Each structure stands twice: as C-alpha cells, then as structure tokens.
C-alpha cells in the first residue's frame, strides 16, 4: 500500500472548504467524473477548472468533513503521470443536524506538474440526504 499523495489531500480540503484553492490543485483543463451522479440528475462529467470550482461552490449545507479509513494504491499509468486508487470513508454534518456518511472509491491521475489531471469518483447516490 502507498501513502495518499498530498495533492489529493489538498483537493479534499479545498472541495469541502475554500473551493477557490482548487485552481492551484487541478490542471486548467482537468476532468472530473461522477459515474453514478446521473441517477440524481446532476452532472456526471465536469471539464475545466471553472466547471470543477463551480460544482463544489454550489455544494452548501454540509460542514465538518472528515475522511478516514484510507486505502491507497498506486497503479500503472499508460502515460508519464502517476495514477492512484483511493478507497475512503467520508463523513459530514448536514444542514438539518443529521450526518452524511459515504464510502468512496476514487481513481485519479497526477501530471508532471503535480496537479490533478483527471479524477473519477464512485459513490452511492442512495446515501445522500
């Protein structure tokens, strides 16, 4: 097993906090995919940093995010970058006083500049409040 690349930890912190920091974490033409989000009527693919920042900026009402139980694996990359798979649990307080609990599987690539080039995030839409 491997250690979570710092760029992914920075992505989690920015996506659940200061979303403007995503500009320094993602490549300008980065792609973020949520394969199961279509069942909720939300985007399944975001292309470009403006779309990625806009998506996370619109997610309001949840706070106190924590990520745990991380299992990290580096995988073979077909090009010069690095690719990773992370399994993790996410937890947050919801605006109505409840809790959001989710298990994630994330695959992502980091370019030679240290920024995220693409990410594919799998999660269970039935767990959303």
Image (spheres, rainbow, N blue to C red):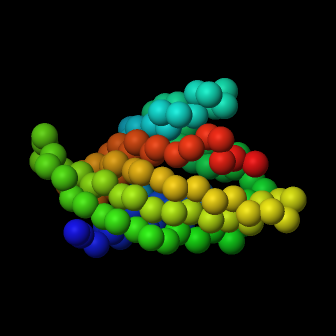
Q: In this view, does 107 lie to the left or right of 13?
A: left
Q: Nearer the viewer, residue 117 or 69?
A: 69
Image vertical order of residue 111 relative to residue 45, above or below = below
**Where the N terminus falls, by quadrant?**
bottom left
Residue drawn 36% across the image and 58% down it: 86
Residue 87 locus on image (x, y percent): 40, 58
Residue 27 in percent (x, y) is at 37, 47
**Relative side of 60 to 4, left or right:** right
Residue depicted at 56% across the width and 44% down the height: 124
Residue 127 image point, x, y percent: 66, 48
Q: Residue at x 44, y 70 (%)?
A: 69
Number of callouts in the render?
Answer: 0
Q: Quadrant of residue 13?
A: bottom right
Q: In this view, does 48 lie above or below 70?
A: above
Q: As drawn, which residue projects farthest toward the right?
A: 96
Residue 115: which quarter of the image? bottom left
Quick check: 28 above or below 21? above
Q: Position of residue 67 (x, y in %)?
A: 52, 69
Q: In this view, does 3 lie to the left or right of 36?
A: left
Residue 43 seen from this side: no
Q: Name the residue at 19% across, 53% down.
A: 75
Q: Is 121 on the left or on the right of 3, as rendered?
A: right
Using the image as rendered, state which of residue 89 and residue 110 is in the foreground. 89
Residue in front for this viewpoint, 22 or 106: 106
- Asked whether the viewer can see residue 64, the reply is yes
Farthest residue to the front: give it.
126
């Amino acid at each position: 097993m491997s250690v979570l690349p710092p760029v992914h930890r920075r992505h989690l912190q920015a996506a659940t906090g200061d979303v403007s920091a995503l500009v320094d974490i993602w490549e300008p033409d980065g792609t973020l995919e949520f394969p199961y989000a279509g069942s909720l009527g939300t985007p399944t693919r975001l292309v470009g940093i403006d779309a990625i920042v806009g998506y996370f900026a619109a997610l309001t009402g949840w706070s106190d995010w924590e990520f745990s139980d991380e299992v990290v694996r580096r995988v073979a990359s077909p090009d010069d970058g690095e690719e990773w798979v992370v399994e993790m649990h996410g937890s947050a307080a919801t605006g109505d006083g409840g809790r959001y609990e989710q298990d994630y599987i994330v695959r992502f690539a980091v370019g030679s500049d240290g920024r995220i080039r693409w990410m594919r995030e799998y999660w269970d839409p039935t767990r959303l409040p």
